[in-house]
């Protein structure tokens, strides 16, 4: 087993004072850059972890992380992320650590801004953020940097965070395009459908769409033209627009839904008597699974929100307690789920 070093042993090994090592570990001044680098390199080599329990008892404080995610009432996808946060917190049960999960409305950027302002005012020890609103998230992350609040993002990649956990969204869009071309059985156009979010302010949608387009850009002959449609199922006019597109000439050869709400499109297709149109979407929410079992959804790309949130909390705790830097990006596998293998994913979550 790898030897566990105490701070005194690290100091002795490097022929430095315990105080110098302590200043490096806690990021305090008074140490030359050369010495700081030597200490950090050694700490990483031996996977050194200071006694965070003793430190938190000595300081008589609890380290708190705020988690900002969309409401689970509007999208059950985020329920799995919530469970991932809770599971990670249990793993640090021996430490004086806590998480506070707070929700915002995925249809309302103002609710997100209000929650961000509240978070900044409370100055938590760290923030885990699902940045659904791209423009507002950039400003919030810059404020976190200014206030020296470590922040980690998941689900959607945005610069300026300490780390990102999620999939290569561009590549997942390519996978979606590849799947559709393999299962379409007629010539016609493909539809890329964004559901219930503003794609112009949602980086995860745009990256998936760009990957989808890129797949076809590489082909010498474009067999499948495609169109992009944004639809809000809360607005009847938007639904009627999609109905018209689906019924016009009945030349739709396949559909790619960029969010976890593929079931909404599958339900509409079924109601219009077009349930046989191949459909690829995202995520193992219960409603999607029901249409997968009926073979009205052909494939789901599993983004694993549980694991995304779990890694996010673990990385933040490691950074706050032990000064351990997380990877800049933690990319999860792009899992392709069908009716034949979905049960194994459900049981593992």
Image (tube, rainbow, N blue to C red):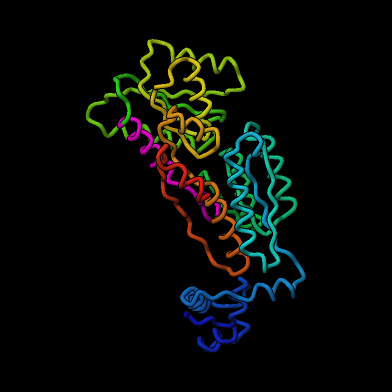
Residue nearest the viewer, comparing 67 with 8:
67
Task: Report the residue that reaches farthest toward the top.
Answer: 249
Q: Residue 92 placed where, x, y %?
A: 63, 64
Is 16 positioned to the left or the right of 124 in the image?
left
Determine whether, in the image, residue 110 is placed left or right of residue 244. right
Residue 174 located within the stretch drawn in magenta: yes
Q: Quadrant of residue 219?
A: top left
Q: Nearer the viewer, residue 293 or 209?
A: 293
Q: Could you say where residue 33 lies in the image, as x and y percent from the top left?
A: 52, 74
Is 304 within the magenta? Answer: no
Q: Is residue 333 above or below residue 174?
A: below
Of residues 157 and 340, which is closer to you in this image?
Answer: 340
**Residue 156: percent from left, percent from top:** 52, 43
Q: Residue at x 51, y 45 (%)?
A: 346
Q: Is residue 233 left or right of residue 64?
A: left
Q: Residue at x 52, y 55 (%)?
A: 163
The one of 274 and 165 positioned closer to us in this rendering? 274
Q: Residue furthest right?
A: 60
Rendered residue at 38%/42% (across/down): 171
Count every numbered label the image shows and give the total.
0
Q: Which residues are magenta?
A: 159-182
Q: Residue at x 75, y 72 (%)?
A: 59
Residue 185 lies, in percent from the top left, at 30, 23
Image quadrant assignment for residue 113: top right
Is 191 situated above or below 158?
A: above
């Amino acid at each position: 087993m790898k030897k566990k070093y105490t701070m005194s042993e690290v100091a002795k090994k490097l022929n430095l004072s315990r105080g110098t090592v302590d200043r490096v570990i806690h990021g305090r001044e008074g140490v030359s850059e050369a010495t700081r680098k030597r200490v950090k390199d050694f700490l990483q080599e031996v996977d050194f972890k200071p006694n965070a329990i003793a430190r938190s008892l000595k300081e008589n404080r609890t380290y708190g992380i705020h988690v900002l995610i969309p409401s689970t009432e509007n999208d059950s996808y985020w329920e799995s992320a919530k469970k991932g946060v809770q599971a990670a917190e249990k793993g640090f049960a021996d430490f004086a650590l806590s998480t506070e999960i707070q929700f915002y409305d995925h249809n309302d950027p103002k609710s997100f801004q209000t929650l961000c302002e509240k978070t900044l005012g409370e100055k938590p020890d760290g923030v885990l953020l699902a940045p659904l609103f791209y423009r507002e998230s950039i400003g919030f992350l810059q404020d976190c940097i200014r206030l020296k609040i470590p922040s980690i993002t998941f689900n959607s990649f945005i610069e300026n965070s300490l780390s990102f956990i999620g999939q290569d969204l561009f590549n997942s869009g390519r996978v979606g395009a590849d799947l559709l071309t393999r299962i379409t059985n007629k010539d016609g156009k493909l539809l890329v459908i964004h559901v219930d979010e503003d794609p112009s302010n949602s980086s995860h949608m745009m990256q998936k769409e760009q990957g989808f387009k890129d797949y076809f850009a590489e082909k010498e002959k474009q067999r499948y033209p495609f169109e992009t449609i944004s639809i809000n199922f809360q607005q009847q006019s938007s639904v009627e627009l999609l109905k018209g597109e689906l019924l016009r000439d009945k030349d739709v050869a396949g559909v790619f839904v960029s969010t976890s709400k593929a079931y909404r499109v599958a339900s509409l297709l079924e109601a219009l008597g077009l349930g046989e149109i191949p459909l690829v979407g995202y995520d193992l929410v219960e409603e999607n699974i029901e249409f997968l079992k009926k073979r009205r959804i052909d494939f789901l790309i599993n983004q694993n929100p549980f694991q995304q949130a779990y890694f996010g909390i673990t990385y933040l705790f490691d950074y706050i307690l032990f000064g351990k830097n997380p990877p800049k990006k933690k990319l999860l596998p792009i899992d392709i789920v069908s009716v034949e293998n979905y049960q194994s994913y459900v049981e593992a979550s």
